[in-house]
Amino acid sequence: REREEARLSEKDHSLSEKDRSLSEKDRSLSEKERSLSLREHAATRAGEEADAVAEHSRREAASLHAAREEALASRERQVRGEEDTLAEGRRSETHALQEARAEVARLLVALDRTEDQAR
């Protein structure tokens, strides 16, 4: 049981680390999106050649946005999966504890009978 709790704690820590890492990536992607947005604005004012740069930047922004959305969706799936695993572990521990309690109750009844018989 202690090993299971340690394992669950380790998974919880790992999930926190993954969440932190994805949050850092999200911030980085947001900064890149802002940078690309500024580049698009400057390119629009620069004429036909700049329009080509702006189109390229828009594609990059869309790609970055899609990557950001996928990273967020992936993080949500990971969190849900880890939460499900943790919940299943807790259910399993609770079930084992209930079984242990039932066994203790059976042993106490048997002990009472043995004591009664001994008297």
Image: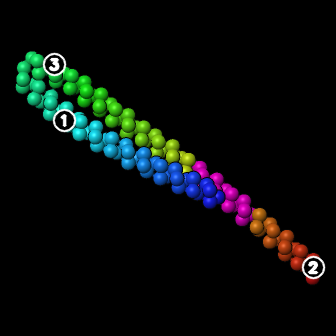
Q: Quadrant of residue 52?
A: top left
On screen, residue 101 versus residue 80, left or right, reads right
**Counting residues from the N terminus, which is met first, the one under dot 1 or under dot 2?**
1
Q: Which residues are magenta?
A: 87-102
What amino acid is labelled 1 in the image? Ser
What amino acid is labelled 3 in the image? Ala
Please, which colouring scheme is shown? rainbow
Position in image of residue 100 (x %, y %) = 72, 62
What amino acid is labelled 2 in the image? Ala
Name the image quarter holding the C terminus: bottom right
Q: Which residue is mark 3?
A: 52
How many dots with numbers? 3
- Using the image as rendered, state which of residue 96 and residue 24 is in the foreground: 24
Front label number (3 vs 2):
3
Residue 35's mark?
1
- Vertical arrangement, residue 53 with respect to residue 6, above or below: above
**Counting residues from the N terminus, which is met first, the one under dot 3 or under dot 1?**
1
Q: Main secondary structure of the magenta part?
A: helix
Position in image of residue 21 (x %, y %) = 38, 45
**Residue at 29% across, 32% down:** 65
User: Which element is circle 1 on?
Assistant: helix
Position in image of residue 98 (x %, y %) = 69, 61
Q: Estimate the spatial distance between the alpha carbons at disc 1 and disc 2, rounded to whole Å.
A: 86 Å
Q: Which residue is mark 2?
A: 118
The answer to whether residue 94 is visible is no
**Residue at 21% across, 22% down:** 56
